[in-house]
Amino acid sequence: MARLKHTPSEAPRAPERGVRAATFRQLLQAAMDIIRLKGHIPSVAEAAARSNVSRATAYRYFPSRSALVTAVVDSSLGPVRQMASDNPNGRERLHELFCQTFPRFKEFEAPMRAAAQLSLEQWGLERAGLLAEEPYRRGHRVRILEHALEPMSPLLSPRMRDRLHHALSIVYGIEPYVVLKDIWGLEDREVERTALWMADALVDAALRDSAAKRAAAEAAAASTPPPAPEWFDAQYNNRARIPEHPSILKYWADASAQALQRPEWIRDVAYGDDESERLDILPAASGVGKAPVFVYIHGGYWRALDKRDHAFLAPPLADAGATFVQLNYALCPAVDIEHIARQMTQALAWVHRNIAAHGGDPARIVVAGHSAGGHLATMLLACDWQQVGPDLPRDLVKAALPISGVYELEPLRHAPFLAADIGLTEASALRLSPSAMPAPKQGTLVTVVGGDESEEFHRQAELIASAWGPRVVVDAERSANRNHMSVLADLADPASGTHRQALGLLGLADPPR
């Protein structure tokens, strides 16, 4: 579902009882009276004067005009902010929302207009570099509309779901009052009817477009014969596609052996009971603590390689200020991919709970991976962490950087070189495909693909971008003259776009433009 690029302003927490609660309500009422009677947004000092409260006291409750207006809006919306419906019909749920909310917009029209006015006023000051206070950020409608649209989500593509969310946010709010009353002179009831009609039209268009695209895709799939097994091998068997792969693997091993000589490494830390459940940590070179955390998952089609083969990636990232963590996991065919995915969630939970002891910031975790590791990194971005552990935040993974990742597993069932080892069924391939999962509600993803990779790896990257939409998949790095294996070295090259993408996601540099 669509997400704001900024964090909405939070209202100061109202004291529950006693003199402080009375003073809070007194200041809030004074601000609402000034807005209603004088038609302008009061400063905190004006609200203090009207309520006979000292300025110092008023600023303890409301440190800025934005905080004061946020509290006014929250009070005006009242129960609408917490509205919840169990109606399984999305359109009816949307109608309930409009019918409950618009009468409240009418009752509190003045403070709602004042909030919009403040936002516009601060926009100009911010652009001119003259804004001297915390900006007022609106955003209640995002969460409210997300709840209303929830039943429709299975009927809409992720991109269409986000577009409908964006479009309805224009129709739902004070803006229809400003346009339809001020320009057209409509009465309040007619404003409500027109806004609801627009909402219905947008829902109809979204459902119609999604149904048409779904039907077209199904028709195309039905008319296209499946490729031969040899085609899948040619697309996905990268060792066969890359004659120089032995020298690339040797470079990884030699460079990693050199990197592992750094004395700062903390090796083979257990994140679980099985011997395969081990990780290595290279703390950030800065040593100042609270470093962002870069977690790397190796590839090998879930059946080969080891974390120690990829340690060469760590020093450039640690030297740039990140705490580097690399994970091991059990390999197919001894286990299946679903087991490996569970191991990765267990590993990330360990990292969140323990990385602070090694100088890492558990609130800034970025996960990357190559090939099958890219698939696992993407799965971790989509994970519902509250189901893994109630102590884990929903946004445990802030971003993912899959390099040559696989996001649709169905084609691998038809590749003879691999199918028997990974043992996917039609059902498990679908269940483990990130492209078939709902777009994460938080976090961002940047895909990386080598320019010389097969058509299928380019299609895979385009597929996840289409499935999850631009809100989540914020960039796509295409590395010229790189194949499926040589592309990985770019992560360790400070001059490369892939390395700069990693630093950007970690907050250690601006992302490439």
Image (cartoon, rainbow, N blue to C red):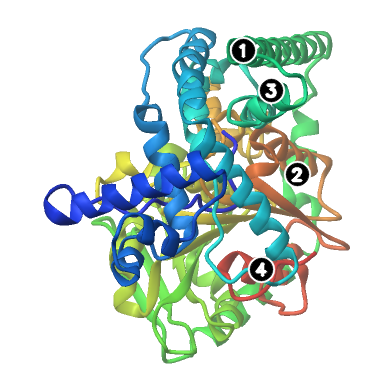
Q: Nearer the viewer, residue 109 or 253?
A: 109
Question: Callout 3: few (<14), some (14-19), or many (20+) C-alpha neighbours within 10 Å?
Answer: some
Q: Which residue is mark 2?
A: 457
Q: Position of residue 355 (x, y in %)?
A: 34, 71
Q: Which mark is residue 156?
A: none
Q: Which residue is mark 3?
A: 181
Which label's residue is closer to the chain start, 3 or 1? 3
What amino acid type should be assigned to the residue bearing mark 4?
Leu
State yes or no: discs 3 and 1 in contact (Cβ < 8 Å). Answer: no
State yes or no: discs 3 and 2 in contact (Cβ < 8 Å). Answer: no
What amino acid type should be assigned to the residue bearing mark 2?
Phe
Q: CA distance from mark 1 to mark 4?
A: 61 Å
Q: CA distance from mark 3 to mark 2?
A: 53 Å
Which label's residue is closer to the chain start, 2 or 4? 4
Q: Does any portion of residue 94 appear in the rendered image?
A: yes
Which label's residue is closer to the chain start, 4 or 3? 3
Q: Which residue is mark 1?
A: 196
